Amino acid sequence: MYQPALKEHLVRKLYQLKLVEKRPMTKLINEAVEQYLSAKQTNNNMEEQNERSN
């Protein structure tokens, strides 16, 4: 399976967040990616609707 590398500065920030939230970094990353993809999908759907109405 493909395992993309994260930039080192992001890993440091995630590690600090992990310590504060007491949650595994993998869970934080999964949550962030799911939120990002959901927002992108919403934006894409809105753009498609706007294009259809024009």
Image (cartoon, rainbow, N blue to C red):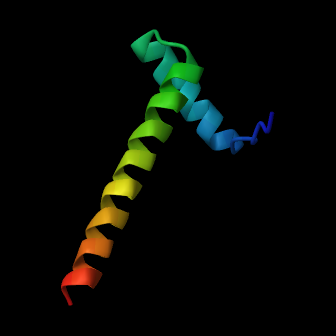
Question: Is 53 on the left-hand or right-hand side of 42?
Answer: left
Q: Is residue 6 above or below residue 48?
A: above
Q: Total of numbered circles in the picture?
A: 0
Q: From the top left corner, tell me how far across and down residue 43 is, in percent.
A: 32, 63
As rendered, which of 35 and 41 lies closer to the eye? Answer: 41
Instruction: Name the residue located 60 percent from the left edge and 40 percent from the top edge.
Output: 10
Judged from this view, the residue extending furthest toward the top is 22
Question: Is 17 on the left-hand or right-hand side of 2?
Answer: left
Question: Is 13 on the left-hand or right-hand side of 1?
Answer: left
Specify the quadrant that holds the N terminus.
Answer: top right
As rendered, which of 17 and 49 lies closer to the eye? Answer: 49
Q: From the top left corner, tell me how far across and down residue 26 is, in percent.
A: 59, 22
Q: From the top left corner, tell me how far across and down residue 48 is, in percent.
A: 32, 73
Q: Quadrant of residue 14?
A: top right
Instruction: Name the residue located 40 percent from the left edge and 57 percent from the top edge.
Output: 40
As rendered, which of 2 and 12 lies closer to the eye? Answer: 2
